[in-house]
Amino acid sequence: MTTTKPALRPANPQFSSGPCAKLPGWNSDFLKNAMTGRSHRSGEGKQRLQYAIDLTREVLQVPDDYLIGIVPASDTGAMEMALWSLLGERGVDMLSWESFGAGWVNDVAKQLKLDNVRTLTATYGELPDLGEVDFDRDVVFTWNGTTSGARVANGDWINSDRKGLTICDATSAAFAQNLDFEKLDVVTYSWQKVLGGEAAHGMLILSPRAVERLESYTPPWPMPKIFRLTKNGKINAGIFKGATINTPSMICVEDYVQALEWAKNLGGLEGLIKRADANAAVINAWVEKTDWVEHLVVDPAIRSNTSVCLKLSDSATQGLDDAAKVALPKAMVKLLEAEGAALDLGAYRDAPAGLRIWCGATVEASNLEALTPWLDWAFAQSSK
């Protein structure tokens, strides 16, 4: 263990799990072509928004018959639009194994107040029994649990001949993991995750089955304008051609476009996944040789390659009461921030005490390699 303060700091100490690190080399010149002061409804504005949608389809490998829309309020807005617009036609299975999944359970059960709701839960670091999911019902789940580090390994557990819709919050998985779109009817994410874009804008991707539901089923509750995906009983096609419901920031749009072009030049989705896997491998190798830390997710098959969640080992916390077990990682985070060695890597507030290190594609492996000695040092200092 490193007890002497390391000499080398990460060149970029930003390891937040959202908003995430900007792409390597990012600076304000990336935004020089942003359409500031122009209407997003101008011909040029719509073209830029459509270009962002087209690049999304290319890099994320979205099927041609799926719709892609830019929507307000980040991933949360995209998910709320889907839940309020699509649910209620049949029963729904809600899958929850971390805080954001639990939030969707709360929205469906306590806000929408649907009667036929079944919840399948698991503790942080694990998944519920996916074999118990009933695909005659709608199914809502997160692909990658941002606050627990547990992800579904693939889409094999989802029935191809399902009668219900699958609604997937993929915000910390999109652009870092292979999403099986043929098994997904709704996919949502936000710009500020894997591609390091700016916040406040979300993406809503709909399968033909989801469009069919929108056009054949009308929810019994009032629908705010910001959630309305249909017009006169038909899908509002303009939303999926750059005619956004509300005014987007064209600076944020340009930032997203630049990130997508960077991703395309990396080799697209495969290149992004390769970088995230390599980044996670740096942390995995360090954990394997370090006795004071463990993965929160024990099973490597369901361990995230983006939001890597860690906990102190039993040997590291032996003799500590519960309060001290919580205080120790918090002290480490505070010390690392004071040294400028690592920022924003504390566990999410609802998660078990520990560390959460973002390993998405915009992070450089060299910075993670420089980080690990600082983690050892911070533990040694904080546990004295």
Image: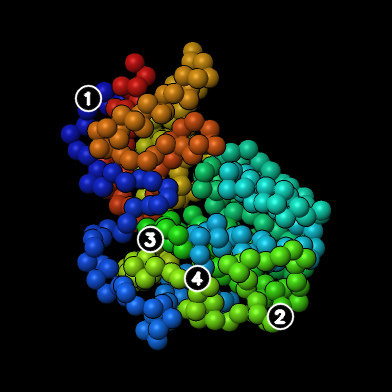
The residue that label 2 is drawn on is: 233
Q: Residues within 10 Å of mark 1 (few under 14, many from 20)?
A: few
Residue, x 63% and y 66% (percent of image)?
224
Q: Which mark is residue 246?
A: 4
Comparing labels 3 and 4, the label whose residue is closer to the camera:
4
Q: Amino acid at mark 2?
A: Gly
Of the 4 image quadrants, the one containing the C terminus is: top left
Of the 4 image quadrants, the one containing the N terminus is: top left
Q: Which mark is residue 188?
A: none
The residue that label 1 is drawn on is: 4
Disc 2 or 4, which lies upstream in sequence?
Answer: 2
* Tag 4 secondary structure: loop
Comparing labels 2 and 3, the label whose residue is closer to the camera:
2
Give me the C-alpha separation between circle 2 and circle 4: 20 Å
The residue that label 3 is drawn on is: 197
Across and down, in percent, residue 106 comes to 67, 47
Badge 1 vs badge 4, beta-carbon distance below 8 Å: no
Q: Is residue 167 above or below residue 97?
A: below
Give me the C-alpha separation between circle 3 and circle 4: 19 Å
| Side of 8 relative to 380 (left or right) | left
Quadrant of the image occupied by residue 128: top right
